[in-house]
Amino acid sequence: MFPPTVPLHRPSYQKLSTKLDPIKLDDNNWVLWSRFANALLIEMDVELCIKQDCEGTYEDYKAQSVILQTCTEEYQVQISHLTSAYAMWTHLIGLFTGMTNGKLMSLNEEARLFKMKPGEKPSVYVMRARKIANCLRSLGRQHDDLATCMMILNGLTPEYNDLKQIQHEMCY
């Protein structure tokens, strides 16, 4: 059962929605979505409903409405039977904590074993490294430019050993 739909037509929400495209929760954007949804909940003054159970209150229905309206249908189906915004938020955190930890482990391993492929163009190699770094950052992991640089240097093929030696001396 869906909670009563609460229109999101407060003047402050309208101002916010004209500046931002709504973000729908999917498998790849938990961190971004949770920040966006939390900002909407704060804007509507109902963020308390995801921190403690306010089941049955008007504020809780508003919070449930925000959560449901910003989820893709796949996640709406998974949480629509829950009776409070707190239960919905907690359920989503549980879903994504496991997924995020698995992705982080996989990406950390990929970064640790990152190597240049034989015959690979340096530009393609650097783009692969940036993709890994960006994915790690999107999952909330600290991964600065120096870490990306070291990942790139450590994975270079033997033909770049002279360059690697110069760079290592400059960094240390």
Image (cartoon, helix red, strand yellow):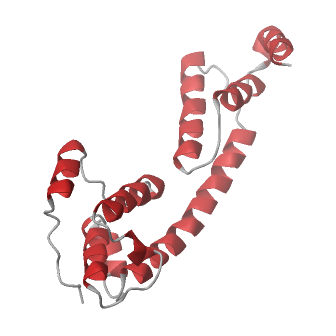
Residue 97, position in %: x, y? 57, 67
Q: Is residue 103 above or below residue 118?
A: below
Q: How many marks?
A: 0
Q: Do we see residue 16 in this rendering?
A: yes
Q: In the figure, is residue 141 to the left or right of 153? A: left
Q: In the figure, is residue 69 to the left or right of 148? A: left
Please report the residue visible at 43 percent of the width from the left and 85 percent of the height from the top: 53
Quadrant of the rendered structure where residue 78 is?
A: bottom left
Q: In the figure, is residue 151 to the left or right of 138? A: right
Quadrant of the rendered structure where residue 121 is?
A: top right
Viewer-side residue, 3 vs 57: 57
Please report the residue visible at 36 percent of the width from the left and 85 percent of the height from the top: 84
Q: Is residue 166 above or below residue 55?
A: above
Residue 138, position in %: x, y? 51, 46
Q: In this view, does 141 lie above or below 7?
A: above
Viewer-side residue, 163 vs 75: 75
Please report the residue visible at 55 percent of the width from the left and 51 percent of the height from the top: 139
Quadrant of the rendered structure where residue 59 is?
A: bottom left
Q: In the figure, is residue 96 to the left or right of 167? A: left
Residue 99, position in %: x, y? 55, 64
Q: Is residue 54 above or below residue 95?
A: below
For the C terminus, the image quarter is top right
Q: Do we see residue 25 in this rendering?
A: no
Viewer-side residue, 5 vs 129: 5
